[in-house]
Image (tube, rainbow, N blue to C red):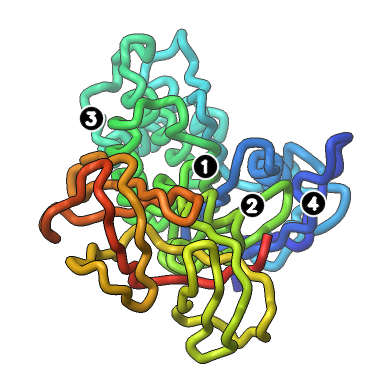
Amino acid sequence: MPLLEVHHLTKSYSEGRFPDDISFTVDEGDILCLLGPSGCGKTTLLRIIAGLEIPDSGKVLSEGRDIRDVPVHQRNFGLMFQDQALFPHKNVFENIAFGLRMQRLPEEEIRERVAEVLDLVGMIGFEERDVNQLSGGEQQRVALARSLSPRPRLLMLDEPLGSLDRTLRQRLMNELRTILKGLGVTAIYVTHDQQEAFAVADRVVIMDRGRKVQEGRPEEVYQRPATEFVARFLGLENLLPGRVVEAGPPLAVETALGRLTATDSPALPVGQAVTLLIRPEGARCLETDSPAENSIVGQVQARSFRGGHYQITVAAGGTSLRFELGVLDGPVPEPGEQVTLCPHHVQVLPAA
């Protein structure tokens, strides 16, 4: 039985329904990420699960029990926000101990739990430190320690790294997953950053305008986006409208770049309008101008070094496409040069 079940949750506002008929489950020990743009209903979902909002319809079950009428403080769910909400007049120890004292735990147990969570977040020795003298990353670790100390059955994190700079966010997202998995904590993690979601989550639910549009493991979602919205949201922008000219297999689609063959495509009728996704990674430069299957001929508009790869922008067929070429894969064309590229993976999506 899942630890948490969300069934058809809906909450209406003047602008629309956010969330809108959302359902998902969270198994014990799993990290589920709600991923989507700002305003799509992610935070409202957390507040409904926590008991801070009442849905218009739908149910939240915890271990099979409907918890609609269970007060917030009796759910044993933790909630961590982006702004940390630390008490500025309390030191690190007192911030973490606050919730434990509200539970009326013995002082010795409080000290043991505070020491335990400070060790987990790498902040042993900071007990007496003024929270106002901590860096942003240190404050975020204290907020996480405070959320973990009551040992919640479910921990919900709302954009917990959103206020940090990118370098610090990169480091903490990896540490955060290690901490949560090490403790076996069940968690729901909210973010609008796909890289953060993929680094932390076991499973991802992508939301758009209140609705769930795709769910799966991070690898599945990235490798096979279900719609054009999902592809664009994940940063996959090589999208071309086209029309099926051969039902296949393999499926052939006529586009502004010419005829392209789709890999792993469902059977579709000739004449069907579709959108093709050409993945930026996996393309290779051909050393000859002779046409090959799925070859794209264009002119390099820009080239940018990204560490492990170069990103090149290619103008072809009246559109701009971006590709990633490995630094060890051979010479990379300069801006202004004509190039023939052969992408390895072309995916069919429903027409927008």
Q: Quadrant of residue 331?
A: bottom left
- State the CA–CA distance, disc 4 to disc 2: 23 Å
Q: Are marks 4 and 3 in contact (CB under 8 Å)?
A: no
Q: Amino acid at mark 2?
A: Met
x 31%, y 47%: residue: 300
Q: Label 2, label 3: how many angstroms apart (C-alpha)? A: 38 Å
**Residue drawn at point x = 31 percent, y = 18 percent:** 135
Residue sticking out furthest to the front: 290
Instruction: Name the residue carrying label 3.
Output: 124
Does residue 281 appear left or right of residue 247 in this picture?
left
Identified by mark 3, the residue type is: Ile
Seen at 55% across and 38% down, the residue is 158
Q: Element at badge 2?
A: strand
Disc with the residue nearer the chain's start (4 vs 1): 4
Which label is found at residue 207? Answer: 2
Q: Say if 224 sits above or below 123 in the image.
A: below
Of the two numbered discs 4 and 3 on the same chain, state the one appearing first in sequence.
Answer: 4
- Which numbered disc flags the more N-terminal residue, 2 or 3? 3
Q: Which residue is mark 1?
A: 191
Numbered disc 3: secondary structure: loop
